[in-house]
Image (spheres, coloured by chain):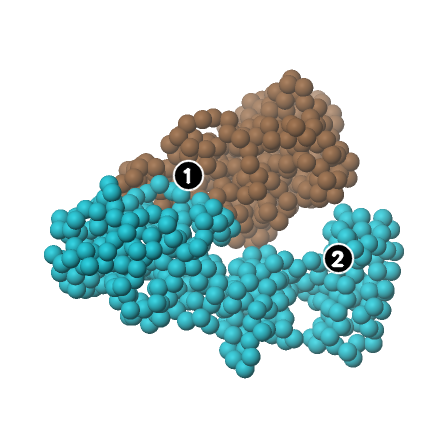
Chain colours: A cyan, B brown
Amino acid sequence: MNEILLLKLGELVLKGLNRKLFENLLLKRIQYTLCDLGQFDIRLAQSTITVVPQQAGVDLEEAAERVSKIFGIAAFSRAYVTEKNMDAILQAAGEYLGEELEQAETFKIEAKRSDKKFPFNSPQICMQVGEYLLEKYPHLTVDVHHPDCIVYVEVRDYGAYIRGRALQGAGGIPVGTGGKAAVLISGGIDSPVAAWMMAKRGVELTAVHFASPPYTSERAEDKVVRLLTRVSEYSGRMKMYTVPFTKVQEQIRANCPEELFTIIMRRFMMRVAEQIAKKEECGALITGESLGQVASQTMQAVGCTDMVAEMPVFRPLIGMDKTEIIAVARRIGTFEISIEPYEDCCTIFTPKHPRTKPIPAFVEKGESMLHVEALVEECVQNARYRKIGYRRQD
Amino acid sequence: MEIYLDNSATTKVCRPAAEKVMECMTVLYGNPSSLHTMGFAAEKEMTKARAAVAAQMGAKENEIIFTSGGTEANNMAVFGAVSVGKRHGNKIVTTAIEHASVLGCMEQLEKNGYEVVYLQPDSHGMILPDQAAQAIDERTILVSMMLVNNEVGSILPVEAAAKAIKQKKSPALLHTDAVQAFGKIAVNPRKSGIDLMTVSGHKIHAPKGIGALYVAKDVRIPPRTFGGGQEKGLRPGTEALPLICGFGEAVAQLPDLSREMERIQSLYDSCREQLLQLPGIVINSPGQGLPYVLNFSTCSVRSETMLHFLASRQIFVSAGSACAKGKQSHVLAAMGLERGRIQTALRVSFSRETTRQDVSALVQGVREGISSLAVGKA
């Protein structure tokens, strides 16, 4: 089969001298994403990546589906490759999009000739292909403004490509170009979206999840695994750390003022996550906080949690409404998992009247009964990780 | 040992599937919906089975709804599709050679005022792509066409129907009963443009009482039973974990389909050839059908007589669909075969357990049956 994938680069074409770096990372990412589907020849030329199956029977539809989720690609399409001569192009144009053309009433041709040695220029290609298709499908008429079907013919260095309309890619920039960060993930709607948004900006992920058995169940943890598996379709593989958090929460309940339970707990999460982040060579933390959504996400509360972290804390959802967050969650397929009803560690031990404008000095005093460092150390020591989204045994 | 050649009726459960069933009844016996660890373990096992069934047809896990078998899945699909489509029209296209569990639904729908078009097969049980294309129009709300016929093994033009639906911009959903095809030929509903697809466990060495309906991810059909929301609300009730996992295991045990097909084809060819050498025998199966099913008529001994004669020698075949329980075959009748041929028809159906010796024994049995039982012999 002469069918391949054509991928158009997104915003990284704007990069300057380090553009090569971005491109190489992207190529590697595509390679890894497709590695269990078969052998592919993946190369970049003229701002377009061609993905060419090297064996028969490759599931190109699955490949296209996976590629649609790789950041750094603005648009993609399946295409048919032919030799660079007019007869072959005509025949391929008539056959490859035959089904679509049969159902269409109007069409147009768009030609692009980046190989200037090809004897016909773009308007000439358009005319010849158009004429041929009109003859082959007499029910068609040409409409250059609002056609039902567009046949693209691209004559490039390595061959001629016939394709239909391109589909929108995931956008963003390749994961890995933006450093690495640890995302605090609970199992709710927000944190997977936050993780996805940072991955879109090139950030490689490590995930930190807090579990409090017996208050939380195995199913809650499994839910997070499934959420991250969805995210990893975009972000690529990651490690997920599970931190046993019961002791910390019980100590807070026994020793701290009730109205500060949540804020103190969040400070512990930050501390533990930062230690793990350092171990994993991350440069930042990511949380799914959105200003004013709940008591621990007011400006003062966010300030109090930030104080314990040295690393920058990215909060990509900070200015988003819940409805906007949900829209993204639906699009990336995490919403239906997030709404499963299992308890997570943020929903247990919640105070009746949490302090919405905590004052740092009072919070620090509130924690003074606890052996903060020892508790954090214990959490980090007992954290275990699993691999998410790995496509090879490595 | 028995010579079992009635695999289109049902198959022997393979050992790994039987062991899995046992394990799910005695070890992993938690309720998959229970919150505790045992429930979770059961759920994980069920997810594995669902993934196996989904992978076998190139589908996603959330497109698989487990049912009690083919009949329930067919009912769910046909009535579900009709209630989705009823605002677009009232025409249904199906074939005269569907399984009873589809034809039964159609009868019911006709009583409720739907127009049902039954495509008629030719004398080999084949339906032409053009027939399907012509029948489908913009008022059609459901096309239900089996992939492989259970009595003669003909392969129906389901993909042509999918194409016609698209081309004519018909609102119709496409349902296919793939019970006889699943696990024998590669089926991929997404690639073939199928919206709803029925499969069954006990035709592929899983226990009886388990099947599944594939529901394409962009297709929503309403539930017909109500309760605790299991199986996406379409099939509520505690999941039949042992059967589901047995089904999953049976799917995992399927051999390489194309290689097995070659083997079965050579069994079929040799069986057909040997039978044709006996006096009076005609083949009812089409030349290009699925070689797992071979339907023939002795033209001299009534089906039931021959069936019992063979059974007395531990050879088990059928006179048609087991679901018809000895009534005259509607499939052979629709093919326009004469009475004498229909009344003396036999179906043998193979599985991966069938051997050459089985085939020879069958031919020998039929030969002796004809010579000792035939009436009106010259």
The secondary structure type at the circle numbered 2 is strand
Q: Is residue B2 left or right of residue A136?
A: left
Chain letter for mark 2, please.
A
Q: Can residue B164 be spotted in the picture?
A: no
The quarter in which the N terminus of chain A is drawn is bottom right
Picture disc at residue A150:
2
Q: Residues within 10 Å of mark 1 (few under 14, many from 20)?
A: many
Q: Is residue A113 left or right of residue B202?
A: right
Residue A142 position (above or below residue A35): above
Q: Quadrant of residue A376?
A: bottom left
Chain letter for mark 1, please.
B
What count of labels does the image hold?
Answer: 2
The reply to whether discs 2 and 1 touch (Cβ–Cβ < 8 Å) is no
Question: Is B360 or B118 nearer to us in this picture?
Answer: B118
The quarter in which the C terminus of chain A is drawn is bottom left
| Nearest to viewer (mark 2 / mark 1) | 2
- Residue identifier under label 1: B244
Q: Quadrant of residue B220?
A: top right
Q: Is residue B89 left or right of residue B363?
A: right
Residue A211: x, y in percent?
A: 26, 52
Residue A91 position (above or below residue A28): above
The amino acid sitting under disc 1 is Ile
Q: Quadrant of residue B160?
A: top right
The amino acid sitting under disc 2 is Ile
Residue A150: x, y in percent?
A: 75, 57
Residue A80 position (above or below residue B377): below
Question: Is B156 or A164 nearer to us in this picture?
Answer: A164
Residue located at (83% from left, 57% from top) = A133
Residue A302: x, y in percent?
A: 32, 57
Q: Can residue B66 be spotted in the picture?
A: yes
